[in-house]
Image: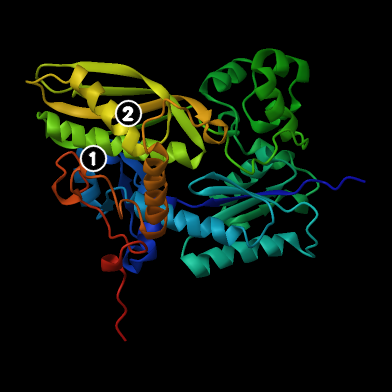
């Protein structure tokens, strides 16, 4: 007899804001917001900040006075810190379940099916307390027979204090009350377009969707909608992914901290983005046959405007940063124009092939294998000692990069930089 699936979703509460509190206890109870690249808009808020009416996507300059008025702590995005704490959370969860799907930087699905646990709700509370004790991060957990219901249970556990951060749907015989608590647009897998369609057809809650006609759902919402429908009715239709699917294209791009006008400065940024994009490409075992480089000014600045891009078809599949850089420089030379204030450049890699299917060719450049080994060795060093522990000079020295993001309120890299390690005085 097949055992009922038991899927848990663990979600870190207000993750970016919570990360800032881990090494700064004075922030406990104080409203916090985290800003996007170049300190542009608000991308994360603590519960206290939400209570003040501060919204996601609010431009920082528009709400700056409100933030000061309410003594809100404001931080630039510290992705190094957030990424490292995320990795520690996931490593902790892997001790709790033999099967873990990392869904995002702050979410993971656990497969608890078949695990002999006398009290699963108590076990979920133990996971929650362990993460809080070991890492100082609050999490919410939902347990259900499907991934969609686990997401729904997690949402309710997070928003309702009576569940103390954990909702196990198996503790209840009637789930309709919980489905009725969630608006249909908040159901995992229902996007803006489908939610508008559902509302027009008098389907307003997760319960309404679960009770809808199956044939109508399949016809109007295709197979994706049908899976959501089945999952809401307790039928597993979305399997756990042990490895994220390989991306078909990878882009690395960012707005500059200040405007650039010189080719060499812009080229440093392009070189950096080539390194980042190719690093991601290598991590999924791919090589690219096409590279696109683009450049633009600020469309909102009252100055001459310019945008251009160029596609480079590579002579053979490439994955080494050092072999991509010359082609990127040639591409930038084709589109760079003097007399403009450049705000953004980017690199797009696409048309992938798997590196394990590549063959050495007689037409490959001399010593190509040795050059690729250099890139692979650099990846190993950077993985062990942190990003850009070693990097190509073409990307410019880190201390003099005028194109780096504006991050005036950046917290320290407490877990990845020796100089930023917290000090404890006895």
Element type where label 1 sits in the image: helix
Residues at circles 1 and 2 in contact by the CB criterion of under 8 Å:
no
Residue with the most extreme left position? 339
Mark 1 or mark 2: which is in front? 2
Above or below, 47 relative to 337: below
Q: Residue at x 78, y 44 (%)?
A: 174
Side (left or right) of 59 relative to 219 = left
Count residues near mark 1 (Cα–Cα under 10 Å), then give few for <14, some for 14-19, many for 20+. some
Side (left or right) of 5 relative to 287 = right
Above or below, 215 relative to 328: above
Q: Residue 413 placed where, x, y %?
A: 31, 60
Side (left or right) of 87 relative to 268 = right
The quarter in which the C terminus is drawn is bottom left
Q: Is residue 1 visible?
A: yes
Residue with the most extreme right position? 1
Quadrant hosting residue 350: top left
Residue holding disc 1: 38
Q: Residue 111 placed where, x, y %?
A: 70, 50
Q: Residue at x 58, y 34 (%)?
A: 245
Given residues 378 and 382, the one toward you in this image is 378
Q: Residue 45 placed where, x, y %?
A: 37, 47
User: What colouring method underlies this structural image?
Assistant: rainbow
Q: Is residue 299 visible?
A: no
Given residues 72 and 270, the one toward you in this image is 270
Q: Residue at x 75, y 26 (%)?
A: 211
Q: Residue at x 76, y 54 (%)?
A: 171
Residue holding disc 2: 347
Q: Earlier in the sequence, mark 1 or mark 2?
A: 1
Q: What distance separates the C-alpha of mark 1 from that of mark 2?
A: 19 Å
Count residues near mark 2 (Cα–Cα under 10 Å), then give few for <14, some for 14-19, many for 20+. many
Given residues 39 and 232, the one toward you in this image is 39
Element type where label 2 sits in the image: strand
């Amino acid at each position: 007899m097949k055992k009922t699936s038991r899927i848990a979703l663990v979600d870190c509460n207000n993750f970016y804001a919570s990360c800032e509190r881990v090494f700064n206890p004075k922030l406990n109870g104080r409203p916090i917001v985290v800003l996007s690249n170049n300190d542009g808009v608000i991308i994360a808020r603590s519960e206290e900040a939400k209570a003040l009416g501060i919204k996601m996507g609010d431009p920082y300059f528009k709400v700056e006075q409100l933030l000061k008025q309410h003594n809100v702590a404001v931080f630039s995005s510290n992705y190094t810190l957030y990424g490292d704490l995320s990795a520690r959370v996931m490593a902790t969860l892997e001790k709790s379940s033999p099967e873990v799907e990392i869904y995002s930087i702050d979410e993971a699905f656990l497969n608890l099916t078949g695990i002999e646990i006398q009290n699963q709700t108590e076990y979920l509370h133990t996971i929650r307390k362990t993460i809080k004790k070991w890492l100082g991060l609050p999490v919410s957990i939902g347990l259900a027979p499907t991934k969609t219901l686990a997401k729904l249970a997690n949402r309710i556990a997070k928003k309702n204090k009576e569940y103390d951060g954990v909702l196990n749907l198996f503790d209840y015989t009637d789930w309709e009350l919980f489905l009725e608590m969630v608006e249909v647009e908040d159901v995992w897998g229902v996007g803006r377009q489908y939610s508008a369609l559902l509302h027009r057809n008098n389907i307003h809650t997760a319960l309404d969707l679960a009770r809808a006609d199956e044939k109508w759902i399949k016809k109007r919402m295709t197979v994706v909608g049908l899976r959501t429908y089945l999952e809401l009715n307790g039928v597993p239709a979305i399997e756990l992914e042990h490895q994220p699917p390989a991306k078909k294209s990878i882009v690395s791009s960012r707005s500059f901290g200040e405007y650039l006008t010189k080719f060499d400065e812009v080229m440093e940024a392009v070189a950096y983005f080539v390194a980042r994009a190719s690093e991601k490409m290598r991590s999924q075992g791919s090589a690219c046959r096409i590279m696109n480089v683009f450049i633009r000014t600020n469309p909102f600045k009252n100055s001459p405007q310019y945008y251009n891009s160029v596609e480079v078809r590579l002579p053979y599949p490439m994955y080494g940063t050092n072999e991509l850089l010359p082609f990127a420089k040639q591409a930038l030379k084709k589109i760079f124009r003097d007399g403009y204030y450049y705000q953004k450049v980017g690199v797009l890699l696409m048309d992938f092939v798997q590196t394990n299917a590549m063959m050495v060719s007689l037409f490959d450049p001399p010593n190509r294998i040795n050059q690729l080994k250099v890139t692979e060795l650099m990846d190993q060093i950077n993985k062990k000692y942190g990003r850009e522990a070693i990097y190509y000079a073409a990307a410019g020295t880190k201390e003099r990069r005028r194109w780096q993001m504006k991050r005036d309120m950046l917290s320290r890299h407490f877990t990845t930089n020796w100089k930023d390690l917290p000090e404890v005085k006895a």
